Image: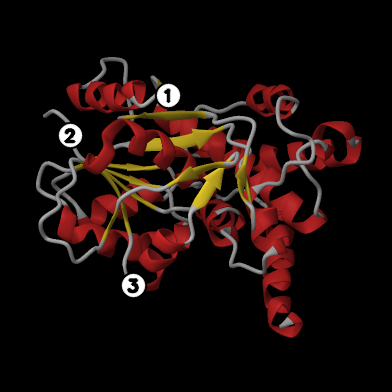
Amino acid sequence: MKIKKVALVGFGAIGCIYARNLSKKLGNDFAVIAGGKRAEKIRSNVVKVNGKPVVPQVISPDDKNWKADLVIFTVKNYQLAKAIEDVKGIVTENTIFLPLLNGVTAHDQIKETFKNNTVLYGIALGIDAVRTDGGITNRNDGVINFGEADNKNMSETVKEVKRVFDESEITNTVCEDMIRAIWKKWMINVSTNQLSAITKVGYGAFVSIPEMNEAMHQVMFEVIELAHKMRVNIQKEDAFEYDDILKTFDPDGKTSMLQDVENRRMTEVDYFAGTVIKFGKKAGVPTPWNDRIYLLIKGIEGNYKKLK
């Protein structure tokens, strides 16, 4: 099937970066799906990425005349259930889904609703986007890793999605083992995202401060031990390799969870530490770092009410 129309759900910092490229290439064959006040906000408040406006077409979830061949999700995990409901009116039996969420549960959650559709695996890596009142700034657009679970022989569907990304100048890679790729990204989010939310440090601290670097690795090792129990191929070498990637980021850049905490927004801790703890109990793997991190971040969220 040739992909003509692409929809995106989630117009945060990462979503805006992809919307910029897709809108430029596809025009009215690309749309952000949003309704009500959210749609009004996107239409009335022009977002700028590195000073340049991004003004995509906005389609309401109630629009029955616009159908998507590909739906990309860039929402937070706790927004996914609502996002799935929002796209029901714009999908067909042939629509392809690609979640680019943090964590390891999005694919299965989408598949529960759209059992007969193709749901790919996907992650966004290396984007250091920060959203402020002045818009979005970033140095690295990063790369989308995506595909079926196993891509030793690339499917026609994956080839077609890759064509769309290539023609839209979105850097992408089809990973041979997407389960491994997703768990590697999850390992990173569980560590740097959560620790930065607690300590309020930027990316640079994880390579320049030995204690932060050690804490990051200890949290990663819990995920790696869990992965081994669940037969997912990630190793300690993957944790140490991330040090070099961190050096390419803006040292003052902030993780998404730190930005959430600073703006007193709900975090994804239930999908990071919370899922580690849940999986750990099932697999018989102790998770003391994530046990404590979960309590601390929940405490930070609980304190929002007092600060209002």
In the rendered image, the quadrant that contains the C terminus is: bottom right
For label 1, the residue is 172
Name the residue: 67% across, 47% down.
Answer: 255
* Residue 81, quarter of picture: bottom left
Above or below, 249 against 130 in this view is: above
Q: Nearer the viewer, mark 1 or mark 2?
A: 2
Q: The residue under label 1 is which amino acid type?
A: Asn
Q: Which residue is mark 2?
A: 4
Indicate the position of residue 87 as horizontal and vertical percent values. Answer: 24, 57
Where in the figure is residue 59, as x and y percent of width and height?
Answer: 26, 57
The CA span between labels 2 and 3 is 26 Å
On the picture, is 54 further left or further right than 168? Answer: right
Q: Name the residue: 42% across, 60% down.
A: 42
Disc 1 packing (10 Å; few <14; some 14–19; many ≥20): some
Quadrant for the N terminus, please: top left
Residue 200 point in image, percent of width and height:
80, 54
Q: Nearer the viewer, residue 103 or 203?
A: 203
N-term-proximal mark, 2 vs 3: 2
Q: Which residue is mark 3?
A: 36
Residue under the image location 68 percent in, 39 percent down: 220
Pick the residue in front: 117 or 6.
6
* Residue 66 appears anywhere in the view: yes
Q: Residues within 10 Å of mark 2 (few under 14, many from 20)?
A: few
Q: Mark 3 belongs to which amino acid?
A: Gly
